[in-house]
Image: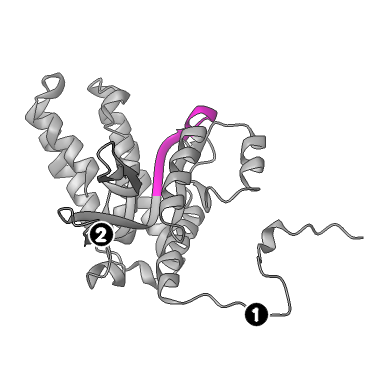
Amino acid sequence: MHVHENNIETKISSNYNGCEKELKSFRDKVYLPMRNRIESLDLTKGRKIFDEVAEILNDYWTKLHKFATDYKIKSQSKFESTFLEEISFYLFHNLNEIKDGRLAIFNKGIYAGLKINEDLSIDVIKKDVDFCIGKKINISIDEQKPVSLIIPAVSVEVKTYLDATMFGEIKSSSKTLKSSTPNSCAYVLMGYKNIADEHILAARQDATLDEMFVLQASEGAPIDSDTLYEYYREIKTAISSLATPPTITVPGRLLQYAEMISKTKI
């Protein structure tokens, strides 16, 4: 699940732009020390530790961008964007539910539904996502050969920046995943926002996405430690809540979306 490392290794093996030697040096002297340092941190210590997390990430991102500029590494090769995807692995690989094997981290072949073929056999629809915490199971359908399904508990789409076109695609993808697994949660983690506020305000009125996190105030700005902490808390809580059955209390509201309630005085 170290997608950024995989990207670096691929460039090394292909001698990207003739800089195999420089890429190896960057991996060994910059990338691996950063990863080892951040993965050794105990994120359960609370809010304060995320100042250190953000400092490590920002220092590396600056060096990563400089290296990409110096050696003319194109953005299309995802040299920098895969770093954003890998951040989620740093944050969540040590969750108790993952360490004890109840859940695992994935990014390919996530369950997105079933379809009936012309011969009336059943096929599984799968989607790739940038980051997913879920559970792999084997099932048999109508006496067909058993198939493996990765059921998402949490799925995250990661973008360097978010514009209106990307937003539409993300909502469609998240709707598919949440329709196939109704109690799953769908999130967006982005570097910076490049979309009009009205799109975000409209998104608050539907249940396609559970939350969107913006790490930077603007392009080139540092990663915000408060937002990083809120993202960590949100995902950790979503995973923990799977083991806590929801309760319904009456009399009272049944759909308790407190953030949706208008505070306008009557």
x then y, percent, for residue 64? 28, 35
For the C terminus, the quadrant is bottom right
Q: How crowded is mark 1: few (under 14 residues within 10 Å), some or many (20 or more)?
A: few
Nearer to us of marks 2 and 1 is 1
Residue 113 visible somewhere in the drawing? yes
Q: Which of 209 and 141 is in front in this view?
A: 141
The answer to whether residue 256 is above or below residue 126 is below
x then y, percent, for residue 73? 25, 23
In the image, the segment drawn in magenta is 156-166
Q: What residue is shown at x 66% (from left), y 62% (from top)?
A: 257
The answer to whether residue 244 is above or below residue 200 is below
x then y, percent, for residue 85? 33, 44
Residue located farthest toward the right when viewing the structure as drawn = 266
Residue 24 counted in the magenta span = no
Label annotation for residue 39: 2
Secondary structure category for the residue under label 1: loop
Q: Which of marks 2 and 1 is nearer the N terminus?
A: 2
Q: Kindly indicate the quadrant of the structure image that contains residue 102.
A: bottom left
Identify residue for label 1.
Answer: 249
CA gap between label 2 and label 1 equals 41 Å
Q: Which amino acid does label 2 sit on?
A: Glu
Residue 108 visible somewhere in the drawing? no
Secondary structure category for the residue under label 2: helix
Q: Nearer the viewer, residue 221 or 227?
A: 227
